[in-house]
Amino acid sequence: MKSWFILFVGLFSSWHYLDLSSDSRFYNRFLPMVFFLFLLFSVIKIALKIGSDGSASGGGSDGGFGGGGDCGGGD
């Protein structure tokens, strides 16, 4: 829960202070990169959360290898 709060505060604050038309490199270049990183981490966190919830619905085959029969050589 704390990580979601940190991501939200980071996204909000970097969006709030972002100014692409500013003469300052901090507001013009650094904060857009920070915003993009927070957005990327948020998307990854959401994807991992969805992926871990949906991975339990397995089922199907074991790849087609195995089964009965004589696999070895010999006499």
Image: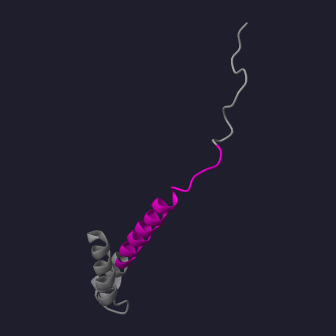
Count of picture labels: 0
Quadrant for the N terminus in the image: bottom left
Q: Residue at x 29, y 78 (%)?
A: 10
Instruction: Using the image as rendered, state which of residue 7 and residue 16 is in the foreground.
Output: 7
Quadrant for the C terminus in the image: top right
Q: Looking at the picture, does residue 16 appear above or below residue 11? A: below
Horizontally, residue 59 falls left or right of residue 40, namely right
Q: Report x, y in % for residue 71.
A: 70, 21
Whether residue 25 is visible to the viewer of this picture, yes or no, is no
Instruction: Using the image as rendered, state which of residue 16 and residue 61 is in the foreground.
Output: 61
Q: Looking at the picture, does residue 60 appear above or below residue 2? A: above
Q: Report x, y in % for residue 23.
A: 31, 91
Q: Residue at x 47, y 62 (%)?
A: 53
Q: Residue at x 51, y 57 (%)?
A: 55
Q: Report x, y in % for residue 40.
A: 42, 71
Horizontally, residue 19 falls left or right of residue 57, namely left
Q: Residue at x 73, y 24 (%)?
A: 69
Q: Looking at the picture, does residue 44 appear above or below residue 33? A: above
Give residue 45's quadrant in the image.
bottom left
Dominant SS in magenta: helix
Direction bottom: furthest residue = 21
Instruction: Using the image as rendered, state which of residue 15 and residue 8 is in the foreground.
Output: 8
Magenta segment includes 70: no
Whether residue 70 is visible to the viewer of this picture, yes or no, is yes
Magenta span: 35-61
Q: Looking at the picture, does residue 22 appear above or below residue 41? A: below
Horizontally, residue 28 falls left or right of residue 75, namely left
Give residue 39's quadrant in the image.
bottom left
Magenta segment includes 49: yes
Give residue 9's quadrant in the image.
bottom left
